[in-house]
Amino acid sequence: MQAEPFVPSNAFSSLIIGGVIKINGVQVPLTLSKTISKPGKPLLTRVEANATVGGLPPVRPPSKLPPPGNLCLQVSLEPERLGYGRVGSVYPLGIDDTNQYALPSLVIKVAARRRSDDLAREAWFYEEMEDIQGVAIARCYGFFTAEIEQNSEVLDWAESDADYDEEEVDVRGEDSPSEDDDDLAEPWNPYALTDHSPDGLVIEATSGWDILFKRNEEYEKREKLRQERRDKRDQIIRSTRAELASVRNGSDKTSLSVLVLERLGDVIPIGVPLEALKPDVHEIYSDMGRFGIKHMDIRWRNILAAPATDQSIICPYHGHKHQWHVVDFDLSRKSNFSHSRIESSADGWLRTILDGLEEGYVVEPWD
């Protein structure tokens, strides 16, 4: 007997969840409303050879979903935390028996205090890649928010507040520098006499002294930009710490945001041969590259086994069901890099990660 198809991912306009907050020490159910996601700043290259035809990011394909529904999803949070990171925590969900529609196993990502914008950006990327939800990435059932009192007890917020005390605010995301971000490239030596700048732009000059002058001028512009960004970071840190002090005084309301996702499986095993799965992992990143998406967070923990369900979808680009899916898009960027350029960038890092796993160790971006 064929299973009933899953309900469309845009079927829910509200969410009722138990186990997330306490008021005066008592757990209470919370009602959240579906909210518009937030696009991030695009990542653009000025190097024509690396860019798409026309130099613009790919346009989002038309949605294949039916008109948005008005259903309410009733769930309860299960106590086992599956993951914890910069943006928030992930928990499994128990689905209320009153829900009369087919759903996969679900998880919820609960934003840490002041991380709603980051989670809204992640939701936007799931929407941007609607065509490969259930193919190369998890299905996403919506981004939901609610206003709550500042002094409400919310899961791991006390833990995330402590993290803010111990370390500087992480202001990555929209302005995160990368090897492909021309405006944020690492400082380069202005005294290296060559007729090409590091970002591929030809510098016209008649002599070494002309090149040196032009490079010094370019270097000063870049340093000015870098200082402006350092000033912006410091301003964010100061304002966030001031906000944290205000939060602790319980002076106002705050926003609680969650993302409801399909539950995926385990991480890639360590210390075993991986030749059989390597092509599939490379293919799912190729799928994302077709949408102009650079993940910006390629890590072992962000590549998970596809769910064991008969409703997995055959990849329209590779003609088979992928065995692995990608998660965590809060740092991702929509770019005008060509599909081949995004593929090659991801492939190099994936080889490093997968080779390390075969040898029995995990390579992280900060290693």
Image (tube, rainbow, N blue to C red):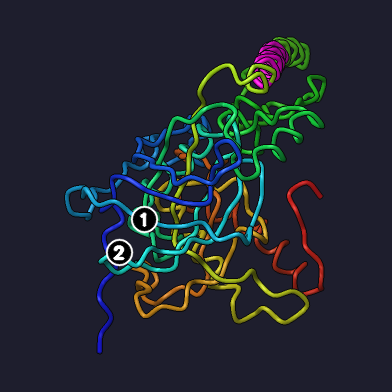
Residue 347, percent across and down?
61, 59
Q: Residue at x 50, y 66 (%)?
A: 283
Q: CA distance from mark 2 to mark 1?
A: 8 Å
Q: Residue at x 64, y 32 (%)?
A: 172
Give the vertical position of 141 relative to 112 (above or below). below
Residue 67, percent across and down?
17, 49
For label 1, count other residues whose C-alpha is less than 10 Å away and answer few (under 14), some (14-19) or many (20+): some
Q: Earlier in the sequence, mark 2 or mark 1?
A: 1
Q: Was residue 335 drawn as part of the magenta stretch in this picture?
A: no
Looking at the magenta stretch, what is its main secondary structure?
A: helix
Q: Which residue is mark 2?
A: 98
Residue reaching furthest to the bottom: 1
Q: Are marks 2 and 1 in contact (CB under 8 Å)?
A: yes
Q: Is residue 326 left or right of residue 218?
A: left
Q: Residue at x 67, y 23 (%)?
A: 248
Q: Secondary structure at mark 1?
A: strand
Q: Kindly identify the amino acid type of the residue bearing the numbered disc 1.
A: Gln
Q: Which residue is mark 1?
A: 74
Residue 123's label in the rendered image is: none
The image quarter containing residue 97 is: bottom left
Q: Secondary structure at mark 2?
A: loop
* Residue 214 can be seen, yes or no: no
8 or 278: nearer the viewer: 8
Q: Is residue 265 left or right of residue 125?
A: right
Magenta stretch in the rendered image: 221-244
Placement of the N terminus among the 4 image quadrants: bottom left
